[in-house]
Image (cartoon, rainbow, N blue to C red):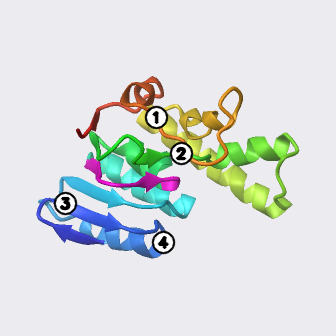
Amino acid sequence: VEAVGDAIVFNGQINARSVAEFLLLLPTPAVTRLVITSPGGNVAAALDMALAVHDRQLDVEVPTACLSSCANYVFPAARSKTVGWPGAVAWHGNMLHVLYLQQAGQGTWSASEIDGARRLAQREADFYRRIGVDGFVCWFGKLPPYNVDDFYSLSVQDMGRFGIGQVTMRD
């Protein structure tokens, strides 16, 4: 995590340490963009980062990959979003999806893990309501008729259907 001109450049896992580094750089007046490449990471840390991105109204650029928690929270929180290629932002579920799987008898999580998932799912719901995005974007592709086993990506138009607007795809 480093400041480069008007951007914070973030490469790697989203976790408590990397988000703390991001938050230390965020008050820099020149910062208007986040350039992120991330496979995702910790849900709570990603929600903290996403709220900071949203509150600061940063633009987000994804040159190569923004997956999992990055796609779920950081990407939709941005003011405007630039994506380097069509599959750069990809989803594979969120905490509400975990609860759905458990309720459907497909989950193997302990009671304490499900309690934690419920708390995070409430934070997710509050976050999505605040930014005006339908969190179903994170896991609808796992359901019929799609039945995606792993990650899935969306067109700019389909992102818009879930409330993720101001997205530009690079040529």
The kind of residue tagged 3 is: Ala
In the image, residue 119 above or below residue 22: above
The kind of residue tagged 2 is: Trp
Residue under the image location 34 percent in, 30 percent down: 165
| Sequence-first tag of 3 and 4 | 3
CB atoms of marks 2 and 4 within 8 Å: no
Q: Quadrant of the C terminus?
A: top left
Q: CA distance from mark 2 to mark 4?
A: 21 Å
CB atoms of marks 3 and 4 within 8 Å: no
Residue under the image location 24 percent in, 63 percent down: 8
Circle 4 residue:
16
Circle 2 residue:
91
The dot on residue 154 is: 1
| Sequence-first tag of 2 and 4 | 4
The kind of residue tagged 4 is: Ala
* Other-residue count near label 4 (Cα within 10 Å), few / some / many at <14 / 14–19 / ≥20: some
Q: Quadrant of the N terminus?
A: bottom left
| Residue 61 appears in the figure | yes
Q: CA distance from mark 1 to mark 3?
A: 26 Å
CB atoms of marks 1 and 2 within 8 Å: yes
Circle 3 residue:
7
Q: Residue furthest front?
A: 171
Q: Nearer the viewer, mark 1 or mark 3?
A: 1
| Sequence-first tag of 1 and 3 | 3
Q: CA distance from mark 1 to mark 2?
A: 9 Å
Q: CA distance from mark 1 to mark 4?
A: 28 Å
Q: Is residue 108 left or right of residue 40?
A: right
Q: Which percent across, then down, holds residue 159?
A: 43, 31
Q: Nearer the viewer, mark 3 or mark 4?
A: 3
| Residue 26 appears in the figure | no
Residue under the image location 71 percent in, 28 percent down: 144
